[in-house]
Amino acid sequence: MDISAVIGEELLAVEFVQDFLQLRFSTPLFILYDWPHVLHTDYSVAYGEPDYRNALCALIGETVSEASLEEGAALTIEFSNGVVLGLSLREEDVDSPVSGSYSETGDPTDAEEF
């Protein structure tokens, strides 16, 4: 799946919705049913750890410099400040058949699942 439209976009909102996460950019939208890791250059933060929500929210206002989605492998979104959101899509790491979805237009009704 091509997610290159998110490159150069600013993260506008991090939305915690019951048991999933939405990442809103000026147009694109990611809905994640599994929780990504927040990877800094010298440490990482995972769901359930102290400051996880703060680490995600600190990315609001940052611009995406690189992004890739390799089905069955990983979703990675790197921001201009060097922080990377990483989500394993390997079968042994996911909890359900669908780990998330991506909409280039920001409309959840035309989102592609991964």
Image (tube, rainbow, N blue to C red):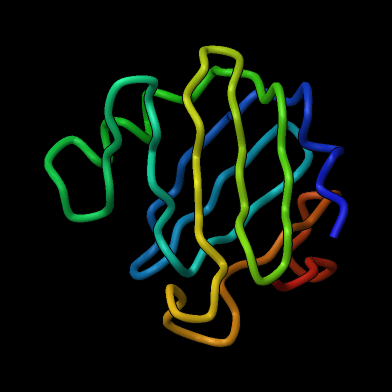
Q: Residue at x 77, y 36 (%)?
A: 6
The image quadrant that residue 40 belongs to is top left
Q: Residue at x 15, y 47 (%)?
A: 49
Q: Is residue 12 left or right of residue 105?
A: left
The residue furthest top is 81
Residue 105 vs 33, above or below: the answer is above
Q: Looking at the picture, how far across and down is residue 27, in whole percent?
A: 78, 39
Q: Nearer the viewer, residue 79 or 10?
A: 79
Foreground pick, 19 / 35: 35
Closer-to-camera residue (24/100): 100
Q: Residue at x 73, y 59 (%)?
A: 70
Above or below, comparing residue 102 to residue 25 in the picture: below
* Res 42 → quadrant: top left
Task: Left or right? Give the position of 57 relative to 108.
Answer: left
Give the percent coordinates (x, y) of residue 110: 84, 68
Side (left or right) of 111 relative to 29 = right
- In the rendered image of this protein, does residue 47 appear above or below residue 99? above
Count up the numbered dots.
Answer: 0
Please identify the residue farthest to the left as the structure is shown. Answer: 50
Instruction: Give the residue drawn at x 60%, y 14%.
Output: 80
Q: Quadrant of the C terminus?
A: bottom right
Q: Which quadrant, please, contains the N terminus?
A: bottom right
